Image (tube, rainbow, N blue to C red):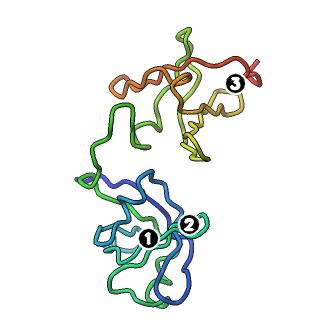
Amino acid sequence: MTNYYKVGKIVNTHGIRGEVRVISTTDFTEERYQVGEQLLLFRDKQEVLPLTIASYRRHKNFDLLSFEGYPNINDVEAFRDGVLKISEKQLGELDEHEYYYHEIIGLTVIDEEDKEIGKITEILSPGANDVWVVKRKGQKDALLPYIESVVKAVDLTAGTVRVEIPEGLLDDAD
């Protein structure tokens, strides 16, 4: 059985030439959306549809894609709200200290005193560095920047992330 990983969601069409607007959930847009690459479109109650990228460009905060064999808006209208995924085989090798979102989400966060802070539920990409959303029991979610001074060790085998919390980062917890 093959695993599939989300790289984006089609939120709308764009223009009349078969382009779709995608909100991406991948750090590798240039690589994922190269002309000729294949993506899989998952939609509710429909068969998975393989799509080959015909074009890719950035426009405002969106990635715009078009697909071979779907040259106009009428062809891609039905793709709206579909989720674009890649197969496990399409995952590339990462450098040291780089992780795929699916590897990080679900890990348990432990502080410098071996206290469990919570579990990572989401990854935000607001700018310079990713921010990991940590669900805490009975408290607001914590937002941890993925930077060297905070994230000390990621142990995928143990399912843990060791962190050093800078003073003031979790003040609302007290």
Report the front residue among 72 and 172: 72
Q: From the viewer's perspective, is the residue at label 1 or at label 2 nearer?
A: 2
- Which residue matches tag 2? 62
Q: Residue 172 carries which label?
A: none
Q: What residue is rendered at 70% in x and 23% in y?
A: 170
Q: Quadrant location of the C terminus?
A: top right
Disc 2 residue type?
Answer: Phe
Residue 59 position within the rendered picture, expressed as x and y whole percent measured from the top left? 56, 70
Q: What residue is rendered at 47% in x and 24% in y?
A: 161
- Which residue matches tag 3? 169
Task: Give the mark, 3 or 2, whose residue is nearer the N terminus.
Answer: 2
Could you say whether the residue bearing mark 3 is in a helix, strand or loop? loop
- Assess disc 1: are there few (<14), some (14-19) or many (≥20) residues with their C-alpha within 10 Å of its C-alpha: some
Q: Quadrant of residue 72?
A: bottom left
Residues at marks 3 and 2, CA–CA distance in whole angstroms? 31 Å
- Which residue matches tag 1? 43
User: Compared with residue 29, is residue 37 higher up or lower down, i.e. above or below?
Assistant: below
User: Compared with residue 97, is residue 49 higher up or lower down, i.e. above or below?
Assistant: below
Residue 42 position within the rendered picture, expressed as x and y whole percent measured from the top left? 40, 67
Task: Give the mark, 3 or 1, whose residue is nearer the N terminus.
Answer: 1
Residue 58 position within the rendered picture, expressed as x and y whole percent measured from the top left? 52, 68
Q: What residue is rendered at 55% in x and 11% in y?
A: 112
134 left or right of 82?
right
User: Compared with residue 46, is residue 26 higher up or lower down, i.e. above or below?
Assistant: above
2 left or right of 158?
left
Disc 3 residue type?
Answer: Leu
Disc 1 residue type?
Answer: Arg
Q: Quadrant of residue 43?
A: bottom left
